[in-house]
Amino acid sequence: MKKTLVTGAIGLSLLSFTAIIPLQFSTQVAYAASAPIDLIQGHDWSHFSGATVSGNTVVIQGIGRAIVPESDNDDQTTIKNPPINLRGTYLKVSGDFSVTTAIQVAANTSASFMMYGTLPLIQDEWRQEGKTLTLTINKGKLYVEVLDGNSNKPTKGTFGSNLSRLVTLKTVSANNKFTFYANGNKIGELSNPGVFIDGHVFFGADASVGGSYTINSLSAQAESASASVNAVDNQILAIPQTNHSLRSLAEKHVNHLRIGTAVASIPLLTDPSYTQILGREFNTVTPENDMKFQFIHPQPNQYAFAEADALVEFAQKNNMAVHGHELAWNEALPRWLTETKYTSAQIKDILIDHINTVVGHYKGKIKDWDVINEPFNDSSGSFRTTSPWYKALGTDYIELSLQTAHAADPNARLYINEYGVEEKNSKSDALYKLAKGLLAKGVPLHGIGFQLHEDIGKGYTPVTDAVFKSNLKRFTDLGLEVRISEMDVNIQDKVTNALSTQQANYYASMLQVAADNPTFTTFSVWGFTDRYSSLSPWEYFKYADGLIYDTKFKPKKAYQSLLDVLANK
């Protein structure tokens, strides 16, 4: 099948850009108030999913990327997750300014252009919107949506009529309102709730699936003598190292063990505190979402690698390994896959194509993969039967996935990743039986990831280090590598000094298990700061307490406990 590989840049708590961009920039040029800045020529639009640079124009292809709600009921609407040009050009603004774009829309296409003042938070099956202005041309009208960053419910306006498919749109942000012009004529205005008050404008774009439009020009300018507009091209740089970080102490004292974390691409590319800690403290990264099926394979023959590419580029720049996550799971699957009535043979072909394409794209760049993610039900140890993979192929999808991944990159280490299997129970028994059977058949399985999502407080009793060690032995006796893959320790109660100490001690006990056992390859946490945590409730400005840095990027007792374990090895 013909495949379109769209490359470019992205899609955690709302980003407040008071000290934005971790990674420094190649250009930052102030312009006079009356001088428009060309935002295409000489600037970077090549790292943008769905975008193709053609001379001094940018062609936007609709990729229809969306997040499927957690329960994935047929009557639930998917959440739009359009690309953002995080790895490319953005604006630093002060005061009144305008953005003007000339676009040519293909027939029967809806064309959207977004300007973000703060960026969305993406947590698995939830997208918390930031401050955003979205302009959409559809059927000759301009549809405008304004999000204030406090909810996902926009203020809406519809302006103009009989707008041509070749139209110049100008948006002026001044006097606490947005004013909209089409081909030089004012067509409407909406109140501005401070969308760009933090002084940054990131650009996004999308079109209806199967459609496209061309950005023939894009410019910005100050609209008053006291205002300023600066164009910035985001760059990925190496982060300075220290001698007393988690990664440096592990490399010095426990050289069999990598220290890892899950990573989200939006803060990676836009939050300096996040990026500095990430590059300094960790030597392995796992994409939290950007390699999941619905993010990287949004349409049947269309892949969107930009966000994951940026993560891999950062890792390479900072001498970090990348752990790919994930290739075959029953969640995070796009509706085109789950709602279309494919035959079993077609599902098999889709799975093979997906693994070949994704693993092949990163061949030689990704050290190991979660090929199979969470294959078992929670308590019974039975296989999950709801995925299209199982429905079409039964348990054979597991062997097929591992064989296909190995063929695509023979040097990559291949894992099954599961939660709730740290102790001996029906689920871990089933995992052991599966692994033993695969190895007996010569299937390329190299390791097991133990997720280690644990809770303390309110009567919760997490699995002890002794119990974990006892269960591990039967897996390592098979010759398998093991890794702690997604550790967090959620405090299910009001945070107290005693609970913080308990949390720290628990983190330390599990790192000690990994440090003492040479069959462990990685100790990885599922995010490192409570500011961007998948444990957070899906509510605006609410945070959890399960990670090793707090919401202000200050190290917690848990961080110090990990340092102490590594320093004393």
Image (spheres, helix red, strand yellow):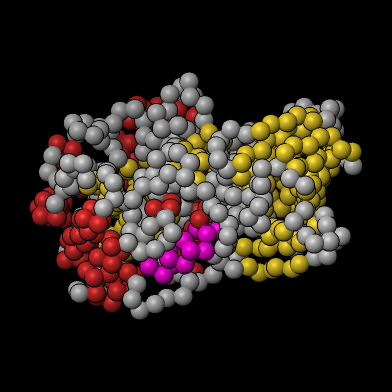
Image quadrant assignment for residue 60:
top right
On the rendered image, what quadrant is the C terminus found in?
Answer: bottom left
Q: Nearer the viewer, residue 135 or 389?
A: 135
Query: Does the rendering let one see residue 26?
Result: yes
Residue 165 shown in magenta: no
Horizontal side, residue 334 vs residue 454: left or right: right
- Return the residue found at the far bottom: 243
Image quadrant assignment for residue 135:
top right
**Residue 396: x percent and y percent?**
29, 35
**Residue 553: x percent and y percent?**
42, 61
User: What span is colored magenta in the figure?
Assistant: 268-282
**Residue 441: x percent and y percent?**
21, 44
- Residue 300, relative to residue 20: is it above or below? above
Horizontal side, residue 216 vs residue 478: left or right: right
Residue located 47% across and 45% down the image: 541
**Residue 2: x percent and y percent?**
59, 40
Q: Nearer the viewer, residue 416 or 404?
A: 416
- Residue 491, relative to residue 378: is it above or below? below
Residue located 46% across and 52% down the image: 264
Q: Nearer the viewer, residue 103 or 126?
A: 126
Residue located 58% across and 57% down the image: 17
Q: Main secondary structure of the magenta part?
A: helix
Residue located 21% across and 62% down the image: 508
On the rendered image, what quadrant is the N terminus found in?
Answer: top right
Image quadrant assignment for residue 206:
top right
Residue 279 shown in magenta: yes
Q: Nearer the viewer, residue 151 or 204?
A: 151
